[in-house]
Amino acid sequence: MNDSVVIHVEGLTKVFEGPFRAVDNVSFDIQRKEIFGLLGPNGAGKTTTIKMLCTLLKPTSGTALVDDHEIIKNPDGVRRSIGVVFQDPALDDELTARENLDFHARMYSMKGGQRRERIAEVLKLVDLHDRADIIVKKYSSGMKRRLEIARGLMHYPKVLFLDEPTLGLDAQTRRSIWDYVARLNREQNVTVFLTTHYMDEADFLCGRVAIMDHGKLVVVDSPGNLKNSLGSDLVTLECSDPERFAERLRSEDWVENLKIHDSAMIVGTKRSAERIPEVVNIARDIGVRVVSIETRKPTLEDVFLYHTGSEMRDSEPNTADRMKTMHRQYARGMGRRS
């Protein structure tokens, strides 16, 4: 594996009974010190991919290297190289922040002096050093999330997995978490692998994002390039006969790309505001009724809709149960290694 690559995924596939291909021949690389985002609608295969990379689930075929450790042949090496912040809280509310971190460090066989030094370091990184001895049940949601990130960093991981790190937090706290993640990546040189339902979060944090749908990787690129791929401007409209209207619009040389989703249409073009009268006139000429029309700059949400045909939702079914199970599996694995 190239020294600049910290995660190499090749042909990764997971088939469940049915047969259902949750992840279907996925390949990608993540560079060291990169913040990489994985986006996808419910059931796209994001969680299954993460579980395989974190050694919680064995792939049906394919493989992956995490910091040069093969996920099947050397799961202990992978676990030593990664930190994981689960979506559902996994802290002991009856312990203090310091005690939670101390327990986690012991799972990684960190010695007493090293534990104390590292606990002080990570608490300072997330601005909780002055609340180290307060029991966690008195923490706000944002403070708990910051403590979870501190715990994920305790054993000096090369890669930090963040699964929906700001789900359920208010906008101000979410932005605060973004700033912490960006700073940790910049100052600690930690590669971050992020899944999120928030397009603005991926746009703000990630150098590159991958979009998954039906188990396959649809596209991988920087947020800027993905938005530009739709056109410099967008015209979005709803009409009575999108198929017929789309066929007519595709003949226009100013249409850079076009996609239909149900009764809605997304048209990429330049100077979209100037095109609205022309679009309306074309619709009238072919007998199509325009219900609504607007113009705007492309967003990552538009990219997501364009490639998947669906809008991102804020939660997935049985999320709490799923994440609690993941944490138990991960903890049991570390316990067996210690």
Image: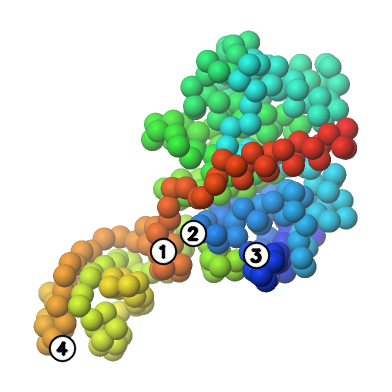
The answer to whether 290 appears left or right of 201 in the picture is left
Q: Disc number at residue 41?
A: 2
Q: Which residue is the site of mark 3?
A: 23
Q: Which residue is the site of mark 4?
A: 286
Residue at x 82% of width, y 31% of height: 108
Label 4: element kind: loop
Q: Which residue is the site of mark 1?
A: 310
Q: Are marks 3 and 2 in contact (CB under 8 Å)?
A: no
Q: CA distance from mark 1 to mark 2?
A: 7 Å
Residue at x 74% of width, y 40% of height: 330
Q: CA distance from mark 2 to mark 4?
A: 35 Å
Residue at x 30% of width, y 79% of height: 255
Q: Disc number at residue 55?
A: none
Q: Are marks 1 and 3 in contact (CB under 8 Å)?
A: no
Going by the numbered disc 1, the residue's amino acid type is: Ser
Q: CA distance from mark 1 to mark 3?
A: 19 Å
| Above or below for 287 versus 177 | below
State the residue in front, 230 or 48.
48
Which label's residue is closer to the chain start, 1 or 2? 2
